[in-house]
Every structure is written in C-alpha cells, then in structure tokens.
Amino acid sequence: MVCKTYKQKQKMRDACRAAATILDKLCKMVAVGVTTYDLDQEGKRLMDECEVKSACYGYRAGSRIFPAHTCLSVNDEVVHGIGDKKRVLKDGDVISVDVCVSMDGHIGDNCRTVPVGLVSPEIDRLLKVTKEAMYLGIDQAIHGNRVGDVSHAVQSCVEGAGFAVITNFVGHGVGKSLHEEPQIPNYGKPGTGPKLKRGLTVAIEPMVNMKNKDIRMASDGWTALAIDGMPSAHFEHTIMVGNDRPEILTIPEGAEASPGE
Ligand code: MF3
Ligand code: CO
C-alpha cells in the first residue's frame, strides 16, 4: 500500500507498533520447557488485550486455512510452523516467532528468530547474519530505488557469509492486506524490478538456511522445512519507504529511541 495521507500512515504505524510489541513480549517468553502451543496462546491473549486480530488465523491458501494465531517455527522449520502442545523448547534450539496483526483495517507483520538457552556459535552467526541482511535490505528502501536494490543487498550479505538464501518465499507489500504487490525477493540484481515510492509499506524478510536453500513441506500442509535438516533463520520488519531513509514501523512500544532488535 502506498500511504498518501497522514491518517493512513498513522494507521500503519499503530498496527505495526502493536505487532512489534506482541512479538517482543513473546520473544521474552521463549525459554527451555515452554511449548509452542503456550506461545501461541499467549500471542492470542496479547492480541485480545491490544484489541487487534491475528492476520494469520484463518488465512487461506487455496483450500487450506491456517489454524494458529502466530507462526512458530523451531530449528529446521523455516516458516509457518503451528503451535503444538507436544513441541517443548529445549536448550540449543532456535525459534522463529512471526506475528502479524490487523488493527483498524491495517496490517503489521514482523518476525525474529531467537535462541533457546545457549546455541552453538555457528547458529548464533546464522541469526546475526540474517538480521544484518534484513537491515542492509531495509537501508535500500528509499524513494527511487528499485526492489532489486533491496534484494541484492540481502543476498550479498547472506551469501558473503556462506549461508543459503531461501527463494521459495519472499517479502511483500503489506497494508490493507497481508500480501500485496510488490514481491520483495531476497535475491536479485541492483537496478532491476519495480521502483519504490515514498509512502509504500513493505515487509522485508530474509529467510536463511545454513547449507541448502531448498525447502520441503511438512505433512501438516503449512510448515516449510529446511531440506538440509539444519536450523533456519527469519527476520522481518514492516517498513515505510521514505525520501532519503526508510521508516521502520515494527518498533515495540517504548523502544522508539533504540530499535536495536
Ligand atoms: N508473516 C507470514 C507471511 O508473511 C504470515 C503468514 S500467515 C499464515 O507469510 F497464515 F500463512 F501463516
Ligand atoms: Co511477511
């Protein structure tokens, strides 16, 4: 969506702040012994408290309907994992917590991969590189640049670090709907693709595997798994394209001064 009026921008900022605040709280709850079902239930409770709706719950892809309030993907689960009472987090795991909410007809989408207890140095590096790639992509989201500038920045960072950028899923425009034009692939050439305009709101979201970029679908029909069976990482912010710098919209309440994460 291209936000043209102050009102539209403000609605996107509000939806995104709620999405980020909920994500932040869920990430702080991640610990050894917690189940992904507990996290999803807490996500639902926080959404009720903020009077927002999950943009995942009931999301349709053909005949499939997403059954959970958040996406919770552990280790080799890349995206769209479903909270499960039997999935107990253990020391050394990583979990991608993806929260997208709808508030007053506008959607905010964000994700972070967080460690559970102590993870190996290589997994720690995977998380750092994926987050760094997201910020380098975001830096390119300025008026007059092209989608390929964002894509290329992400890809160079990931591949430069020796990891594999996933091509089956892409970032996307986000606004009144969760997935809008343009698509923002995490690979591409500078100076190619659609032009970015000030006021355009997009989700920039690198998904990164350790060895092999390919994925396969789990039997639940939703969860995407890394084909190499190794941990995968996913960081996402919703941003607004600016004249000379992007505005990151998914900043939690009270963290405006130091977005950090
Ligand atoms: N943030 C996820 C995405 O952009 C949310 C998907 S909702 C789901 O793909 F229902 F598909 F899980
Ligand atoms: Co998204």
Image (spheres, rainbow, N blue to C red):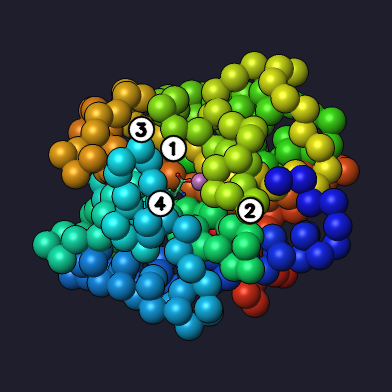
Residue at the outermost left position: 86
Q: In the image, what residue type sits under mark 3? A: Asn
- Residue 17, compared with residue 231, is above or below; it is below
Q: Would you say the beta carbon of the disc 1 residue lies within 8 angstroms of ligand 1?
A: no
Q: In the image, what residue type sits under mark 2? A: Lys
Q: CA distance from mark 3 to mark 1?
A: 7 Å
N-terminal-most mark, 4 or 3: 4
Q: Would you say the beta carbon of the disc 4 residue lies within 8 angstroms of ligand 1?
A: yes
Mark 3 and mark 1 in contact? Answer it, CB < 8 Å.
Answer: yes
Q: CA distance from mark 2 to mark 1?
A: 24 Å
Q: Is residue 54 left or right of residue 35?
A: right
Q: Which residue is mark 1?
A: 207
Kind of element beneath mark 1: strand
Q: Would you say the beta carbon of the disc 2 residue lies within 8 angstroms of ligand 1?
A: no
Instruction: Identify which residue is drawn at 55% across, 38% down.
Output: 171
Q: Which residue is mark 4?
A: 59
Q: Position of residue 179 (x, y in %)?
A: 55, 43
Question: Looking at the figure, which quarter contains the C terminus?
Answer: bottom right
Residue at the outermost front position: 63
Q: Which residue is mark 2?
A: 176
